[in-house]
Every structure is written in structure tokens, then in C-alpha cells.
Image (tube, grey):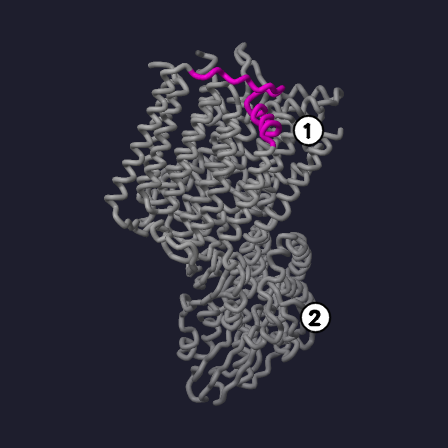
């Protein structure tokens, strides 16, 4: 019962903030709604027993990435820039059509999947770890070590790339 | 029902009120201590030795006109002080003041929650608090606050990296992210981590000064350079919120440092049996005492040191503290594996 | 990263650290100053013109209002200029007391400078310490002439008042206190790493350039130019005393700071010598009832705490007011160096540099 | 009210993803488009976490962490490109982003 209340409230807020992100006139407001959306998603993770993910979501996403967005928005000061469109009507129609098609497709999959029995549960990972954080850490440093290292290389490359791009004169 | 909802709720109410009172009296303490350093008396008029000054200040700030600049972004302008206050308050949820005390025959834990990602939770909440400053700078629609907002965000992000790096080596030592667990680990180890991780302690202390925008890192609100910094355009209660948030953050940093490095509620030298009589003092008093020492040092430093410049601050953060934190982590890891 | 647009900010006229009503228009690239434009005149009272409508004795009072931090130095400069114009002989006792007053003013002015300079860089305790000592000087002046800020302490040809009894002992006691306190300031700042980082290599100006811009006083000596009017063209009783002229080597903010700190010590040295050798005698020379200098013009400069304070006065020999009255204020001339000094530095350095050249707006605007 | 199952989360995820798609399609401001992409990545993360909860297996969360890492890299480079673009063209309209070089 409580779980349902929490879920539906969060779902409403998540989607509401999501809609506000893409409809807000002022880009700074958009960024703020994005933060709110991310925080709601973080709470959803807690409800899904993924505390570590929730904290990382807040720490990295809300506290790091979005601050970067805010920085850029403030730097380019684009409060007054009008959003020109080549052919607004056509593009909107196309956008809504694609989005609707996507929604239908995904719901169809969901409905279809809901009718059949799910696949058998995969065997639980065999680890000595207790607790969510340790479990995730264990997986990252054993089964997923190579992807993990690749991700760190990716971040390094991204960092260098960002510095090069943002430098005044290359 | 009572156990799951009522008791935590009561704890939250008590804690929030205690924090707010502590924060207002922090302001008085700071004024008094700085006054003593500067051979003055400090507030003396309201109540004996000015003890009622915080109440007078609070009333004054509440009654003052609340001005929103004409071309400010109203929503964001209102939101910013709240955004900076809330993270400072919710961080207290995971701080253990004592293990458990017995009250009316009930054993009551002296913390609101002991979550297994406690330390990360605190880092996450502080990372959110940067929004308050950026948004205040942006929403005021004025140049000085904007500059201050940019400064503050850059500063907070840089020092957060150093602090988080440093925390990793501490977690390596303790083997847990839970705040209660870290104190327990210090009890098992038989000594406070400040003796095991002195470098990390220094990094946390310097980083804590920077994270809370305290002197010598108080650039975002450098009165002499940027007038009032990001809260130049704020007045009345909204200004008070920023002010309180700063002091609440100071208390958070001090409490976290106490928990991580000074053994939380443990007495000094918890492994020396000869000092067992110190256990007569309740743990939460030890905790509050250690936190107070930190706060005092914060104030002391503010009264003594000049202010860093923006580029020097950045250099210190990126070129000294972060490499030091990484080196500390490597050494800790090596020792942990080898020993 | 912040170069998407240049930012123009107005520092002042109401800003906590522009020392009055200075307005600096800064063109910023991020935090770096590309250009600075100093706008003055917010405190203009037309003092020079005003003086051309007051008779010679009344002008002393107006000069108080220029550099109100060191009012007695202004008095001294003016009185000596008129005395030069009239070829008046000032009795030695008056000259000695004038020297003591001028040096006390130098200490008071440097105290205020040190306090505000340190405050601008963020060390707020020094501010209160320095003001505590300045307070003692104000007390001494109150004992001497009853005023604490604008003293009207001199007269053409001498002094209006002799020193009160036991005043010299008080001044001696103050000198002892000050020597001790200067060490205290040094303890707080001179070897403080943050202070060094904030002041070293900030606002460097070479000796030649400083001369070319027209800097004077400690700001010039910080660049290593040995120019001190007290030594070069002794006035009052300076020729009788031994003192050193401290010099800097690098011409940065730190050197200017060291020079002024050393001047504290030299000032107490001069004051002690003056008290030791204080001659007996009258305190005012033979001054005609109606002061009416002969026709002619003269320029006379003294070393005020901030630099060369010069008066250029023309008398037509007929009326009892000056024909032309012109002041060369050290603050105004030193302020011209500010745009040159701040270029390329950060916003935070601007306040440090305004403090470092030690201006007082009453004198800049007059 | 029926108990909350992973399907509820999947529906939520799908809806959020659709909002993201709408944002990309409808808005012309490149920063908003970037943020819509972040919304979609989050939608994916919700379903990953839901699967992880369903199977009591942390691999889903590990994936989500990788997604966050990639999102961070994407944001850094993407925003760098946006800044460079803005500096040269003085606009953020994606329709003006039509040259391979400038």
C-alpha cells in the first residue's frame, strides 16, 4: 500500500518534471526541472533497493553533470534567444508521430511480455559480498573489470576532449 | 508502528530544532570569538554578554522587508536559499551522535538513520548544495552575484573532488560506508583515524574550509571584492537562510570530520584501559565536544588568515590537494594489501 | 572558458573596498582585468577655488579637509609654503613640534592604510589592531589641540599651541607601544604564506616607470627609487634627525607593504629624537597681524604619508587672499598608476592594489 | 491497489523515454536536446534497476553505472562542442549546425 503511494507519487513527479524539462521557456528552468527529475529517479532507485545507484545518481548526475549544463547555460546567456524553426508544424507533427509510435511499440512489448511467463531467473551471482554497495563493487571489479577500465579510459578521453574543445585557441 | 515511524519522526523534530538553535548560536559564538581575538567585546547589549543576540537577529531578519530585484528570475530567486539550506539540514540524518542511549527505559539510537551508503549520502547532499549558490548568482540578474556564483561553483566542485578522493582511502581503512560502521571500525582498530590517516585529515580540513566557503577560501562572498558575493541582492529571511546554511554546513563538516577522524562518540584512546574512567562522560558529549573544537578552529582561522585569490585557490585544489589525495589512496591501498 | 563575452563591471562608487567614493570601471575577461578606467570626482568640493576666497590664515582649516587621514601634514605643507613666500623664520621649538605632529600623522595614516589593505586581502583582525593604535594617536592629538580628525593644528609662522604638560611622556610611551605592535602586525602578515602569495609579484612596477607615471612616497620607494623629500629637501626639523629611507627592490605590493611597515619604525625613531632634542623657546615667529605675502609665486613640497604633497601658491601682493592656489596631491598622482598596475591581474588584485597605493579620496578629488 | 511490479517501473520508464524523444524532436535548442537525451538515459536506467530488482541480481545496477559514466563523458564532450559552436556561430539552434566544419 505504502509502496504503491510512493511509487505513484514519484512516477507523477518524474514524468511531470520530465515534461517541464522539454517545455520550459527558460533554459535555466529546464535545467532545474532536470535536476528535480533526477532526484525523483534517485528515490525510485531507493525503492528498487539500489541505494548505491541512488547515491551515485545524485552525486554524479545531479551534483556533477547537471552543474556542467547549468554552467554552460549561464555562460552562453541564452535567455533571450528565440527558438527558430524551419517548419514548426511539420516538425512537431513528425515528432509527435514518432513519439506516439515509440510509446505504442514499447507498450505492446510490455503487454505481450506481461502475458507470458517470464524467463527463468538467472542464477544469483556468487559473491561473498553483503549489501548492495559491496555487491555492485564486487561485480565491477571482477566480472566487469574490463568494461570498467574501458569506462575510465572513456572518461579520460572525454576529459581531454572537453578541455581541447573549450580552450580559447587551439 | 511506534518504532518505525514515531520514534524517527521525533528524532528528526528534535534534531532539526537542535541544529537550528545551534546554528544561530554558532553566529554568536563566531562574533564573540572573533571579538576576543580582536580585543573587542562583541555583542553585549541583548541579554547578559549578548546571549540573546541570535534571537534579536532572527526577529530582525524575519521582520525586514523581503526585496526581490525587479529583473530577477522570481522563481529561481526564491528557490535558491531553500536549495542551499535543505542539503545542509538533511545531511544530519546520517550523523551518529552516539551509539544508543536509554531513555524512559527505551533504547534509543542517537542517529536518525544508519544507511549503508552513509558517507556517500553526505557527499551527495553537499554536491547538491552548490545549486543554491549558482542559482542565487544567476537569479539576481546582477554582475557581482553572477561572478560570485561562477566562482563558488568552480570552487565547490574542485574541492569536492579532493574530498571524495580522500574519503576513498578512509573507506579502504574502515571497510564500510556506514557512518556508524566507521566509528565502530575505529573502536576495533583501537585508535582514531586521525593518527592513521593524518594526510587525509588535513585534506578534509582544508577541503572542508573550502566547501563551506570559510576563510581563507571565502571567495564567493568576498565582501571586499564582490561586495556581498552571491547574496548581494538578498535581504530579510532569504538572506538569513543563506547565512544559516553556511553555518549549518560548518557544523556538518565538523561533525563529519569528528565521526571519520576523531572517533565520533568514542573517548580518547579507546584502546587504553587505564583511561576507562573517561567513559563516565556520555558519548554524545564527547561527540559534541570534538565538533565544538572543530568549529572553534574554523572561527579562529577566519580571524587570523588573509584570503586566497581565485587562481591560487584553484591551484591549491587541483595541483596540491587532489594529487595528495590520490597518493594517499595509493599508499593506503598498498599498505592495506601488504600488511 | 569564460571568454564568450567580456564583462564590464562598475567597482564603486559604493563598494566596500574602494576607500571612499572611487569608481573603477573594469573590463573583465572572466576574472582577468583587461582594462581599468578610474572615475573620480565624487568627493569634489572645489577646495582649491575655495582657498582663493579665504584669507591666508583661514586656509589652514580648509587644508585639513583634503587628506583627512593626515590633516596635520596638510597644515604643515601649506604653512611652510606661505612661510617660504613671506620668508618667515619659524622658531626651532615650533619646527620640532611640527615634525613630531607630522610623524604622528604618518603613523596614523599608515595604520589606516595597513588596516584597510589587510582587510581588503581578507585579514580582518589586523584592521582592528591597526585602528587600536590609530586611536592612541587620535587621543594624543586630542590632548594637543582638542580635535581628533581635522586639527587645524598649525599657524603660519609657527603653532597656535604649545604641547600640554606631560604630553611628551605620553608620546614616548606611545612610541614604545607602537614598536611592539608593529612586530605584532609583522607576525600576522609578513611571513604568512597566503599574504605572500597575494602580494608578491602583484602590481609590479619598475623604478623608471614609477617615476614616469609620477608616483611618489612609499609607492615610489617600493620600486627602489630613493626619493624622500625629508632627506632630499629637508623641511621642518628633519635635517637635524637621523633616519633611514626604506627601499623596496621588486616594486610589487609586498615591497610597498614592507616599506610602509619600516616607515612606522623610522617615524618612532624621528619622534624620539625630536622629543630628546626639543628646544625651549617661542612657538610662533614674528608674524605680521595681517598676513599679506609679497607678490610672487612659490612651490613647496613635503613628504606626506602618501607621497609628495606640494602647494603652488601665487600671491599678487595686494589682496589678502591667494591669487592662485594649487595642490599637488600625492593620492591623485599615485592613482594614475592604478590602470597600469591592475592590467592583467584578477579582480581580487584590484582591491589589493587600490590599497597598495594608499589613496584617500578627499585628497584625490579635493 | 495492486502491488507494484517491475512492469509498473517499465511503463514509467517507457513514458519517460517517450518524453525524451519528444524533447529531441520538438525542441531546437541544442542544450534542451542534450537534456532530453539525459532523460532517455535515465529512463533506461530505471528499467535496468527494475530488472535488477526483479531478478535480485546486481548486474542491472552495474549497467546503470556504466550508463552514468558514459553520460558524464557525453555531457563533457557535448557541452564542449556546444560552447565551441556557440562561440563561432552565436546561436544554439540545431538547424544552424549544418556544416561539418567551420
Pick the residue in front: A6 or C44.
A6
User: Which residue is drawn at the image coordinates 45% and 43% (left, top)?
Assistant: B133
In terms of secondary structure, what is the magenta stretch mainly? loop
Pick the residue in front: B78 or C16.
B78
Element class at badge 2: loop
Measured as percent of width and height from the top left, residue C121 is found at: 56, 55
Q: Residues within 10 Å of mark 2 (few under 14, many from 20)?
A: some
Q: Is A46 within the magenta?
A: no
Measured as percent of width and height from the top left, residue D48 is found at: 46, 27
Q: Which residue is mark 2?
A: C244
User: Which residue is drawn at the image coordinates 44% and 88% (left, top)?
Assistant: C316
Measured as percent of width and height from the top left, residue C349 is found at: 54, 59
Q: Residue furthest top?
A: B105
Q: Which residue is mark 1?
A: B192
C190 relative to B102, above or below: below
The number of callouts visible is 2
Host chain of mark 2: C
Pick the residue in front: C49 or C118.
C118
The answer to whether C305 appears left or right of C28 in the picture is right
Quarter-wise, where is residue C197 in the image?
Answer: bottom right
Host chain of mark 1: B
The answer to whether B46 appears left or right of B207 in the picture is left
Labels 1 and 2 in the same subunit: no
Q: Is A135 within the magenta?
A: yes
Q: Which residues are magenta?
A: A118-145
Amino acid at each position: 500500500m505504502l509502496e504503491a503511494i510512493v511509487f505513484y507519487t514519484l512516477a507523477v513527479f518524474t514524468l511531470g518534471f520530465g515534461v517541464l524539462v522539454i517545455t520550459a521557456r527558460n533554459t535555466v528552468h529546464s535545467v532545474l526541472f532536470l535536476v528535480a527529475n533526477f532526484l525523483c529517479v534517485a528515490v525510485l532507485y531507493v525503492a528498487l533497493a539500489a541505494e548505491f545507484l541512488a547515491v551515485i545518481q545524485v552525486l554524479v548526475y545531479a551534483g556533477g553533470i547537471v552543474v556542467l549544463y547549468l554552467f554552460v547555460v549561464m555562460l552562453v546567456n541564452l535567455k533571450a534567444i528565440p527558438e527558430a524553426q524551419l517548419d514548426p508544424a511539420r516538425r512537431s507533427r513528425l515528432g509527435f508521430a514518432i513519439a506516439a509510435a515509440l510509446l505504442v511499440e514499447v507498450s505492446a512489448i510490455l503487454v505481450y511480455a506481461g502475458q507470458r511467463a517470464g524467463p527463468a531467473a538467472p542464477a544469483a551471482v556468487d559473491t561473498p559480498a553483503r549489501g548492495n554497495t559491496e555487491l555492485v563493487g564486487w561485480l565491477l571489479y571482477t566480472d566487469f573489470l574490463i568494461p570498467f577500465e574501458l569506462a575510465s579510459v572513456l572518461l579520460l578521453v572525454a576529459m581531454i576532449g572537453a578541455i581541447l574543445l573549450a580552450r580559447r585557441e587551439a | 508502528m511506534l518504532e518505525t515511524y514515531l520514534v524517527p519522526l521525533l528524532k528528526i523534530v528534535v534534531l532539526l530544532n537542535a541544529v537550528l538553535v545551534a546554528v544561530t548560536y554558532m553566529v554568536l559564538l563566531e562574533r564573540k570569538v572573533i571579538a576576543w581575538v580582536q580585543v573587542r567585546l562583541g555583542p553585549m547589549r541583548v541579554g547578559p554578554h549578548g546571549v540573546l543576540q541570535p534571537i534579536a537577529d532572527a526577529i530582525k531578519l524575519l521582520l525586514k522587508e523581503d526585496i526581490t530585484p525587479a529583473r530577477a528570475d522570481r522563481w529561481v530567486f526564491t528557490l535558491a536559499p531553500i536549495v542551499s539550506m535543505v542539503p545542509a539540514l538533511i545531511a544530519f540524518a546520517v550523523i551518529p551522535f552516539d551509539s544508543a542511549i536509554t531513555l524512559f527505559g527505551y533504547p534509543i539510537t542517537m542517529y536518525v538513520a544508519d544507511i549503508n551508503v552513509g558517507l556517500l549520502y553526505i557527499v551527495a547532499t553537499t554536491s547538491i548544495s552548490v545549486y543554491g549558490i549558482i542559482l542565487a548568482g544567476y537569479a539576481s540578474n546582477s554582475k557581482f552575484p553572477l561572478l560570485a556564483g561562477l566562482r563558488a561553483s568552480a570552487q565547490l566542485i574542485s574541492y569536492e573532488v579532493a574530498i571524495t578522493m580522500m574519503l576513498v582511502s578512509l573507506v579502504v581503512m574502515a571497510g564500510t560506508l556506514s557512518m556508524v560502521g566507521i566509528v565502530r571500525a575505529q573502536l576495533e582498530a583501537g585508535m582514531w583515524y586521525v593518527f592513521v590517516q593524518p594526510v587525509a585529515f588535513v585534506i578534509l580540513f582544508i577541503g572542508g574550509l573550502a566547501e563551506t566557503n570559510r576563510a581563507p577560501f571565502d571567495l564567493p562572498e568576498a565582501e571586499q571584492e564582490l561586495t556581498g558575493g552571491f547574496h548581494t541582492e538578498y535581504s530579510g529571511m532569504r538572506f538569513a537562510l543563506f547565512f544559516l546554511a553556511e553555518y549549518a554546513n560548518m557544523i556538518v563538516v565538523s561533525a563529519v570530520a569528528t565521526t571519520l577522524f576523531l572517533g565520533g562518540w568514542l573517548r580518547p584512546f579507546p584502546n587504553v584501559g587505564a583511561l576507562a574512567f573517561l567513559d563516565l562522560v556520555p558519548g554524545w558529549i564527547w561527540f559534541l565536544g570534538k565538533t565544538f573544537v572543530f568549529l572553534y578552529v574554523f572561527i579562529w582561522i577566519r580571524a587570523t588568515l588573509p584570503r586566497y585569490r581565485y587562481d591560487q585557490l584553484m591551484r591549491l585544489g587541483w595541483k596540491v590537494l587532489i594529487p595528495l589525495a590520490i597518493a594517499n589512496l595509493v599508499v593506503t591501498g598498498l599498505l592495506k594489501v601488504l600488511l | 572558458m569564460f571568454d564568450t563575452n567580456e564583462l564590464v563591471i562598475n567597482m564603486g562608487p559604493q563598494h566596500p573596498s574602494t576607500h571612499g567614493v572611487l569608481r573603477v570601471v573594469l573590463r573583465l575577461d572572466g576574472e582577468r582585468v583587461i582594462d581599468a578606467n578610474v572615475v573620480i570626482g565624487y568627493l569634489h568640493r572645489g577646495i582649491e577655488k575655495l582657498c582663493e576666497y579665504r584669507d591666508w590664515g583661514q586656509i589652514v582649516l580648509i587644508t585639513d579637509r583634503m587628506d583627512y587621514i593626515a590633516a596635520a601634514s596638510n597644515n604643515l605643507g601649506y604653512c611652510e609654503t606661505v612661510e617660504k613666500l613671506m620668508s618667515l623664520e619659524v622658531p626651532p621649538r615650533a619646527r620640532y613640534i611640527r615634525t613630531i605632529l607630522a610623524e604622528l600623522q604618518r603613523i596614523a595614516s599608515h595604520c589606516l592604510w595597513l588596516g584597510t589593505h589587510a582587510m581588503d586581502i581578507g585579514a580582518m583582525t589586523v584592521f582592528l589592531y591597526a585602528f587600536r593604535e590609530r586611536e592612541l594617536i587620535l587621543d594624543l592629538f586630542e590632548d594637543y589641540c582638542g580635535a581628533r580628525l581635522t586639527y587645524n593644528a598649525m599657524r603660519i609662522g609657527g603653532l597656535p599651541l604649545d604641547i600640554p604638560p606631560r604630553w611628551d611622556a605620553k608620546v614616548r610611551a606611545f612610541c614604545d607601544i607602537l614598536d611592539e605592535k608593529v612586530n605584532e602586525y609583522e607576525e600576522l602578515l609578513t611571513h604568512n604564506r597566503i599574504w605572500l602569495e597575494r602580494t608578491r609579484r602583484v602590481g609590479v612596477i619598475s623604478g623608471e616607470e614609477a617615476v614616469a607615471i609620477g608616483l611618489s612616497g612609499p609607492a615610489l620607494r617600493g620600486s627602489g627609487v630613493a626619493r624622500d623629500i625629508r632627506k632630499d629637501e629637508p623641511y621642518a626639523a628633519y635635517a637635524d634627525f637621523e633616519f633611514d629611507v626604506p627601499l623596496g627592490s621588486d616594486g610589487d605590493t609586498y615591497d610597498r607593504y614592507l616599506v610602509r611597515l619600516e616607515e612606522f619604525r623610522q617615524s618612532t625613531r624621528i619622534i624620539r629624537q625630536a622629543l630628546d632634542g626639543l628646544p625651549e623657546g617661542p612657538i610662533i615667529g614674528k608674524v605680521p597681524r595681517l598676513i599679506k605675502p609679497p607678490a610672487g609665486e612659490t612651490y613647496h613640497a613635503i613628504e606626506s604619508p602618501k607621497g609628495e604633497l606640494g602647494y603652488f601658491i601665487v600671491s599678487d601682493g595686494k589682496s589678502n587672499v591667494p591669487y592662485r592656489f594649487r595642490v599637488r596631491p600625492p593620492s591623485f598622482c599615485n592613482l594614475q598608476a592604478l590602470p597600469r598596475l591592475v592590467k592583467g591581474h584578477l579582480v581580487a588584485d584590484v582591491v589589493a592594489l587600490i590599497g597598495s597605493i594608499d589613496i584617500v579620496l578627499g585628497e584625490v578629488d579635493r | 491497489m495492486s502491488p507494484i511490479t517491475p512492469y509498473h517501473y517499465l511503463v514509467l520508464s517507457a513514458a519517460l523515454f517517450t518524453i525524451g524523444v519528444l524533447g529531441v524532436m520538438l525542441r531546437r535548442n541544442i542544450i534542451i536536446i542534450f537534456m532530453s537525451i539525459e532523460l532517455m538515459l535515465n529512463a533506461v536506467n530505471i528499467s535496468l534497476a527494475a530488472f535488477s530488482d526483479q531478478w535480485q541480481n546486481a548486474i542491472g545496477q552495474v549497467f546503470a553505472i556504466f550508463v552514468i559514466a558514459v553520460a558524464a563523458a557525453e555531457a563533457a564532450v557535448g557541452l564542449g562542442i556546444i560552447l565551441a559552436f556557440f562561440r563561432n556561430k552565436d546561436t544554439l539552434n540545431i538547424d544552424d549546425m549544418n556544416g561539418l566544419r567551420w
